[in-house]
Amino acid sequence: MHLSRRAWLAVAGGTLLAAGAAAVVWRTGLPGVTPGAVVAGAPAGYVDHEGWMLTPADKQALAQASTAAVESP
Amino acid sequence: MQVGDSGILRGGYDCFVVGSGPAGVSLALALAEARKRVLIFESGDEHTVRSELANTVGYGHYSGAYWNAHWIRTPGGTSNVWAGWCPTPRAFDLDNPAVGVRWPVTRSELVGYWKRAAPILNHDAAYIEFEAPLIPGFRYRPVPTPPPKNFASSMATLKASPYVDIALGYSVVGLDADRSRSTVTRLEFLDHRLNTRGEFAVTPAQTVVLAAGGMGNAQLLMLPRADGSVPVGNEGGQVGKYLMEHPEFQVGGEIAIDLELDRYWPAAHKGRGVHAIVADDDTAREQGLYGCSLQCTRKTTDHPMATFLKNQTGRPFYYYSITPRAEMLPSAANHVFLTGERDAAGFHRLAARCVLDARDFLNVELTLRALGETLMRLGKGRVRVNNDRIYKQVWGGGHTMGTTRMGQSRSTSVVDADCRVHGYDNLCVAGSSVFPSGGGSANPTLTIVALALRLADVLAARK
């Protein structure tokens, strides 16, 4: 069977898309898994500071406060 | 009356109850109110805890000593070490198909029995269902902690009842059934004081109720028989399976929040309680969560995170340490089984295998993270997730559940929705061993007593 380059690309792309969709369905179908985190693939909405879930601004303010504390006489 | 002094047990009982813990005593007293004659067997007596008969080996996350500390063979049973906590499962906790949980008893049916059970446990029935909205996605659902009821204190009432006899120092050590395995026909007991055995012929009109705890009930239904046939009550091979605890993670989390939780505790309620936050049903469903109560204690405004947030916002923040108390998913792989070693009563020593699933740990972490993300989004607080305390320091509530679970058929469970052993007319089980799941993270005693009262209604209606 002879397929054009464009047709091969379409087949490969379709296969990848289907596999990706199946993986998402499989992961999100498991009990206990957070669907949002898997589907979106976005970074977590928090930063970590010794286990505390903080905003980046929190962490920056904590770092500044810590530096100020060290620098104060 | 107490039997044993004369060495004579009377006949003519409507019901034989094995065990004098919360389930056995509540059942017996309710049956006595219905003028049914009851004989209670209790291994221990006023002066003896028969600890040599509660000697489990532990495999997995909980040691044998751990299980044995909550298997008390003496009048009052496990209520001798009970702390009095009385939360109720939510609808979601009893019917959550996403994690394979569906109780054959509806919550609306249980509510009436919880309210009847409450005064027995020194609890105020008006607060059985208390909860309050806290922040979007989460609710304030405190754990009521009335003064713990020790059912050993009910012995005087039992002895005074004209309908109840109590055989202290007697263990039931054998059950026989008819050829069709539909009726228990004989009950064998051991008199510990005299070290002699005796028996009762059991008629179809009489009922045997096992109320010997999560370990003891399974042990009785796994008793090997001399002829090598299947033990009475274990025809479906399900006895011992689905052992569960309520995993507990001391200071698994911390919270700094701009809400003072004391304000949510109902002012009219004179009882005590532990502050707790739970995901609401929508949040739990969206995020695939199940039972997890985030119990908040040790309030202070002096914690560095509370101070930091106060400085940032100008509002007061309150710090609490969080002990998540959670549910573990039922699994047939978690079970109790007989070892080759025998004790003084001839029982095979039990082994208990109980291993938390990865999802059980993840459920706790994700519940904390969902709360943390919500508080951050609302600008109302921050949460700390103590990874090592969740994943490496699991403890439990001392709750032995699920070894004779309730369900629709013999192939998946041991008892039906009425707590009757599948296929038997006169063999029932009372206690948390019938729980098909942990009922969320709710401590089991209130539901144990509620189900015992419900079973009493079923048995009292028998002609």
Image (cartoon, coloured by chain):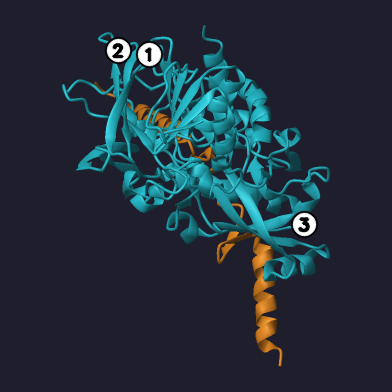
**Residue extending farthest top:** B463
According to the picture, the residue beneath numbered tag 2 turns out to be B181
At x 54% / y 57%, what residue is drawn?
A: B252
Query: Mark on residue B258?
Result: 3
Tell me the cyan chain: B
Tag 3's secondary structure?
loop
Q: Are marks 3 and 1 on the same chain?
A: yes
Residue at mark 3 to residue at mark 1: CA–CA distance? 56 Å
Q: Position of residue B459 (x, y in %)?
A: 52, 15
Residue A55 as seen in the image, left or right of residue B95:
right
Residue at mark 1 to residue at mark 2: CA–CA distance? 7 Å
Mark 3: which amino acid?
Answer: Asp
Colour representing chain A: orange
The foreground one among B238 and B307 is: B238
Q: Is residue B63 visible?
A: no
Q: Is residue A37 visible?
A: yes
